[in-house]
Image: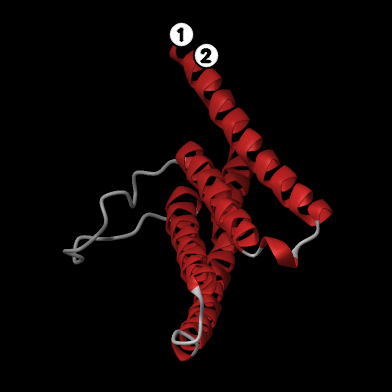
Amino acid sequence: MHNLERAFERALFACRWLLAPFYAALAIGLVVLLVKLLQELAHFILHAIESNEAQTILGVLTLVDLSFTASLLIIVMFSGYENFVSKFDHTDHKDWPEWMGTIDFTGLKLKLMSSIVAISAIQLLKSFMDVKAYTDRELYWLVGIHMVFVVSGILMALTDRIAAGHHDK
């Protein structure tokens, strides 16, 4: 019976590798974001002369938004892989970022939530910069959705803090 249990545990542990294709898919998503960034950058540059101040700010915010999203993908890919699949061998990488390998699942959740709040805030700011293109109802929804993200992030952080305090005792 012990051998059967041990074999089952090994098989179950090996199942973590089923997550690897998910992280590879995120890498493909990063390439797609790069294509979108290049499209937006080309549009931004080609229309820079005729753009007014608000359009220029909207263009810059779009580039920032895409950068945040790409950074979020990197954090999820590397932290998720290290937390759930396997550790990276970074001995040959002299420019290895310090945060990699140090973000646990709780830290990953909080970074993910704070990134979502930041991305949502940028979308909201973009909407306010082009306020005439939106109805009041659409703006209320955008603010409401953003506030849901903010409150969710705060509640998640508080929950993790309470849980951490509970485990310290």
Cα separation, mark 1 vs mark 2, equals 6 Å
- Residue drawn at the location 58% of the way across and 43% of the way down: 3
| Quadrant of residue 92 within the rendered picture | bottom left
Please indicate, yes or no, whether residue 52 appears anywhere in the rendered image.
yes
Contact between marks 1 and 2 (CB within 8 A): the answer is: yes
Q: How is the image coloured?
A: secondary structure
Observer able to see residue 1? no
138 or 154: which is nearer to us?
138
Task: Give the crowd class for mark 2: few <14, some 14-19, many >=20 residues within 10 Å.
Answer: few
Most distant residue in the top direction: 169
Q: How many marks?
A: 2
**SS class, disc 2:** helix
**Which of the two residues, 160 or 83, is positioned nearer the viewer here?**
160
Q: Label 1 sits on what residue type?
A: Lys
**Residue highlighted by disc 1:** 169
Which percent across, then down, holds residue 134? 76, 62
| Residue that mark 2 sits on | 166
